Amino acid sequence: MNSKEPPQILISAGEASGDMYAARLSTALQQRTGAKIFGMGGPRMREAGVEIIVDAKEIAVLGITEVIHKVPTVLKILRRIRNEAARRKPAISILVDSPGTNLPLGKKLHRLNLPVVYFITPQIWAWRPWRIRAMKRILTRVLVIFPFEEAIYKEAGIPVNFVGHPLVDVVRPSKSRAEFLAAHALDASRPIVALLPGSRPSEVGLNLPDMLDACEGLARDLKPQFLMAAAPGIPEQFFQRYMRPGLPIMRIAGEPYDILASADCAIVSSGTATVEAALLGTPMVVVYRVSAPSAFILRRMIRAPHLAMVNLIAGRKIVPELIQEDFKGPRVETEVRRLLNSMEDREKMKRDLADMAARLGAGGAIDRAADVVAAMLSP
């Protein structure tokens, strides 16, 4: 490569959160290096000027058994990215989250003798700890977002940088609570319950029915106002099949942080949204369900004492987590009702969430990650 030409960088991201992180990292790297970036991602990476050669929605799946029917598609996608990497010979490759796709891709890129950096690494401390052996073989460096991860990778002999959590810089409401309530004609004297059933249709289909069962129970006497954060890319018609007559649910697009910040309590699908709710100090009940076959397999793989991300980061149970068969409408209703009826319980959870959020760093994670990658590109 001519030294005067800007470097080429391959970035691979999967789900909506990975697309967001990768887009911000791409922008920071372009500012530092002028790099031409290509890879797999979604709309945010495309808006950031990344040349998308594979749209991440082609591999969006949920659970273990659900992925089986997509194996031929995933293999075809991996070959496509591998072949493009072989042709362009990027100066560095960056994998962002989505280990089910990105670890196999990392192996292919390693065989091409390309430096491979992993940003937002697999949760080997929670499940599939054996993955670290493959990671040691194929990765040049890892950039981790939780402080306790640094020691794990150092002990394994993998070069590591703790950069902090990228959500710390972006999770904040755009309006005050009063402004948000006024904008949507909401009653400040009635409690608000936020619903975040997931970012993919498969998640919503498994989580939303029992969430609505809980809402029906709460509506009988507490009369909350139910606000659902509308996940981008899921059409309104999809949600209509789940709606219940006589149960008003206001779906609001593009304002998830305002919804959470204004809510007295949230019912949140386990994942990134729980960290966002924690950063906003929103009391929550965490729920999740996968298919029965996936659950059977996962029970034999998970080693963590908790499943909710906020509990894992805190190192103790600070929010209720209702997973799989524990996730039933009446159980969710009981936990939400307790939080709505007890200011003391809500305030204690807010204090615990603030302590947990402090562990995620003081901000600047994307800049630190970009600085590390830019330094690796320097002669």
Image (cartoon, helix red, strand yellow):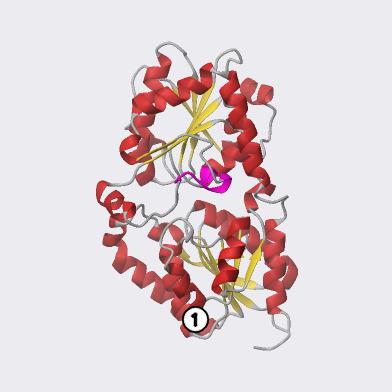
SS majority, magenta: helix
Q: Quadrant of residue 197?
A: top left
Residue 259 included in the magenta stretch of the image = no
The span picked out in magenta is 306-314
Q: Position of residue 321 (x, y in %)?
A: 44, 37
Q: Position of residue 367 (x, y in %)?
A: 72, 61
Depth order, front residue of 278/208: 278
Q: Position of residue 286 (x, y in %)?
A: 46, 37
Left or right of 350: which side holds 207?
Answer: left
Left or right of 15: which side holds 120?
Answer: right
Q: Please tell me whether residue 36 is drawn above or below residue 224 in the rendered image.
A: below
Name the residue at the bottom extreme: 2
Quadrant assignment for the N terminus: bottom right
Question: Badge 1, how many Cα within 10 Å: few under 14, some, many 20+?
Answer: some
Q: Please tell me whether residue 76 is drawn above or below residue 257 in the rendered image.
A: below
Left or right of 26: which side holds 75?
Answer: left
Q: Which secondary structure, mark 1?
A: helix
Quadrant assignment for the C terminus: bottom right
Q: Please tell me whether residue 137 is drawn above or below residue 369 in the rendered image.
A: below
Q: Quadrant of residue 246?
A: top left
Residue holding disc 1: 110
Q: Quadrant of residue 326?
A: top left
Depth order, front residue of 65/32: 65
Left or right of 54: which side holds 371?
Answer: right
Q: Position of residue 365 (x, y in %)?
A: 68, 57
Depth order, front residue of 268/251: 268
Q: Residue at x 55, y 83 (%)?
A: 89
Say whether residue 185 is visible: no
Residue type, numbered disc 1 = His
Q: Residue at x 37, y 34 (%)?
A: 208
Say whether residue 110 is visible: yes
